[in-house]
Amino acid sequence: MLKGKAKEYELIIFDWDGTLMDSLAKIVSSMQKAGGDAGLPILDAKAVHEIIGLELGIAISQLYPEIANKDIEFVRKRYSHHYVELDQQPSLFYPGIEAMLHQLAATDKTLSIATGKSRKGLDRVLSAVDLHGMFDGTRCADETNSKPHPAMVNELLAMHGVEPGKAIVVGDTEYDMEMARRAGVDRVGVSWGAHDSERLHSYDLVGCVDTSADLADILLGNIVK
């Protein structure tokens, strides 16, 4: 990343799992347990990381392309059961993320979420971490098109009356970056999530950051590409 003339963003759209919250291990474990419940092969963490960010039914069908729709629904229900069970102790934010969110919320910027989680799942975790009031808009994969379709971003832009050039997406996967690219908004990757940073760089990023401090610099307009 290069220091230069600051770019001001009005709307910041965050992914959740793997971007803000360190929940990847729970996702992997829940999917492995759900697959086992269905008598399917137990996939390794790398395979599960490939589908993080997608709507759950789409994710399961990509992991297990041989299974029928009724079996996808069974795996979905078992995954949700195991995840809620594991999440009795809420996941932690990545280092510095919660402080960064409060710092951004103290500005005039609009904070939103675009996530592969279900509405029920996102609302549950926002309540658990007491951040419902932090975000001005949220979109979940069970109420609109799944990433990498740009619908989540387009709907948030329309909700807040913001032009694409004044918005940025923050995410950890290629699905986040492609969603942002299709919507015509800037994008910044984080290196600590599901997809390696090398994979994100092909999406013409504003930056790919290693720390929450670097992310805050971009979002606050201190660093641009």
Image (cartoon, rainbow, N blue to C red):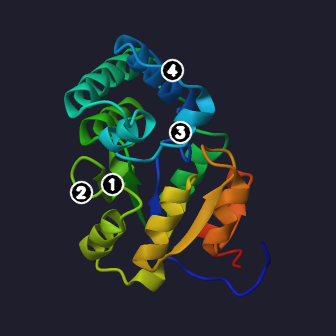
Observer able to see residue 22:
no
Q: Secondary structure at mark 2?
A: loop
Looking at the image, is 92 positioned above or below residue 164? Answer: above
- How far is the residue under mark 3 from the one under mark 4? 16 Å
Name the residue beneath numbered marker 2: 144
Residue at 29% across, 28% down: 76
Q: Secondary structure at mark 3?
A: loop
- Seen from the viewer's position, the closer of residues 54 and 211 is 54
Q: Residues within 10 Å of mark 4 (few under 14, many from 20)?
A: many
Looking at the image, is 124 positioned above or below residue 198? Answer: above
Viewer-side label of 3, 4: 4
Work out whether mark 3 precedes mark 2 in sequence or the reverse, and give the earlier one: 3
Q: Quadrant of the C terminus?
A: bottom right
Name the residue beneath numbered marker 4: 29
Question: Would you say the residues marked 4 and 2 are in contact, meaning their CB atoms lie under 8 Å apart?
Answer: no
Q: Secondary structure at mark 4?
A: helix
- How far is the residue under mark 4 from the one under mark 2? 26 Å
- How far is the residue under mark 1 from the one under mark 3? 19 Å
